[in-house]
Amino acid sequence: MAWLTAHLKTLFASKKPKNPPKRKPPTREEKGKFRALDNDDENAVSSPNFKFQSSPKRSASNCSSNTNSSDLTDSDLLPILHYEELHMVPQILTQFPAFYLVGHPLPPPPLPQARQVLTASDSVKQGLIHPRKSSVRGYNHAKASGREWWDYTPDNGGTLLTLEDESFRHLTREYFEKSIELLQQICGQFNQTLTENGDKRIVIPQEVMEDIGFSTMRYLRYSPTILERPNIPRNEPPVASSSSSSHSASSSRSQPKEDGYSLPRMEAHTDHGILTLMTATEPSGLYVWDRNGKIFSAPPIENTVLVIAGDLMSHFTAIEGKSIVDDGKEAIGDGTILPTVHAVVLPKGGTERYSVAVFLRPKRDLVVSKQRAKREDGEIIERDMTFGRWAEEKGQIRGRRCWMVGQERLSGGQDI
Ligand SMILES: O=C(O)CCC(=O)C(=O)O
Ligand SMILES: [Fe+2]
């Protein structure tokens, strides 16, 4: 497993992109508009194709995160892309850890459905727990982190581990299917780039665009009312800095702060699939990191969805002929997309937060990379790194979420 640890460490210590976005600090008025750069702004981003959309409705002043809007600089803002500009995604994701998409064909986000299932009675929720306690199907909770979630089960047309409610089922299935189609369409953009010979390069395997694979959708609820103080052994004083805490219900551990109070949260991590589409209610508390450790607040913006990259994007977009698994940093080029580190912390004094995340994942047996391995007789052979094996090995590592060099204070330790 050492290779994976080393690999993830190098990913987050990776070099800066060649053309990092340089932008003028915004005026007070621009900050109020949240983002509104004109396309001619030479400092916007060095690419001639790059442009920002004006923010729909929402303004920085109602950002619900802990960030004070008056502290925002323009470069703290994530780009908003229009649906007609999907071709810009491969480039945008090398420069930003996430982007908002506006003008998309999705129905309204199923946030009322998230609330419906996650505020159902305990007996209903207990009935939605997967028989083998899957953490990506049915109902789960991490009470010490003040969070509970329900994962859609696409198998059998979404009729398993779900509510007995036709409208809930219909809206849930519709949002999932349309979101997956949208994410597949985004993936298709990566195969439009031409090689030096003028051929199209297959960056993302075609079957990702044709099969929902192991994709799923998650409804989440964060609330102080879910928070449960973890049991602390009597003679051990609470530890001030929090150490790694798991994403999954079964192993959730948390160290309260000295005042004994912790905010509802999800620890910093990367998703192990291809792309994730997210939307949430206020107050937000969602943060994303770029490859240099810079933190962006990612509050919900009306009529938009937020898209981030999962682990597999780094495999697919590695330098041709190199493997992220074996070559680590050497496999990262200007066009390589790193998985987006993200975390949620509910603002202090905030009420509840609901969110929806749609995860585009391939089938477990999809080969995402090659890995060199030494046989017993000493011969080096290549073996397939499948998505299933990647996810499994990542899941076994303590503090598996991500490694962010220079962010140790946030993680409370060397790893998160
Ligand atoms: O609640 C959110 O906005 C993020 C959820 C998330 O990151 C996850 O479930 O992997
Ligand atoms: Fe996530």
Image: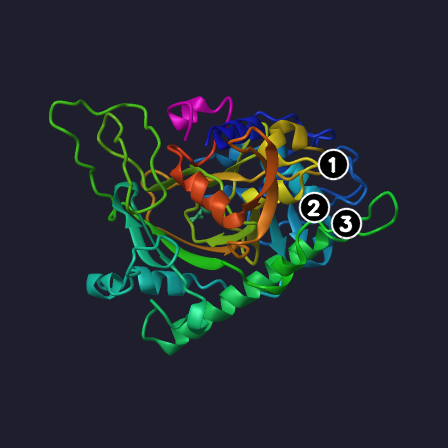
In the image, residue 191 lies at what x, y percent?
Answer: 73, 53
Q: Which residues are magenta?
A: 403-416
- Residue 52 shows in this picture: no
Q: Classify residue 344 as left or right of residue 203.
A: left
Q: Which residue matches tag 3?
A: 201
Q: Is 91 situated left or right of 146 in this image?
A: right
Residue 90 - label:
2
Q: Is residue 411 magenta?
A: yes
Q: State which tag comes first along the sequence, 2 or 3.
A: 2
Q: Determine the secondary structure under disc 3.
A: loop
Q: Is residue 338 visible?
A: yes
Q: Residue at x 59, y 49 (%)?
A: 367
Q: Is residue 66 left or right of residue 369?
A: left
Indicate how the structure is coloured in the image. Answer: rainbow
Q: Main secondary structure of the magenta part?
A: loop
Disc 2, ligand 2: is the CB inside 8 Å? no
Residue 55 point in image, percent of width and height: 62, 50
Q: Which quadrant holds residue 140? A: bottom left
**Mark 2 and mark 1: span between their CA atoms?**
14 Å
Q: Residues within 10 Å of mark 2 (few under 14, many from 20)?
A: many
Residue at the outermost front position: 377
Residue visible at 59% across and 31% down in the picture: 379
Could you tell which of marks 2 and 1 lies nearer the N-terminus? 1
Label 2, label 3: how far apart the Cα atoms are: 13 Å
Q: Element at badge 1?
A: loop
Give the crowd class for mark 1: few <14, some 14-19, many >=20 residues within 10 Å. Answer: many
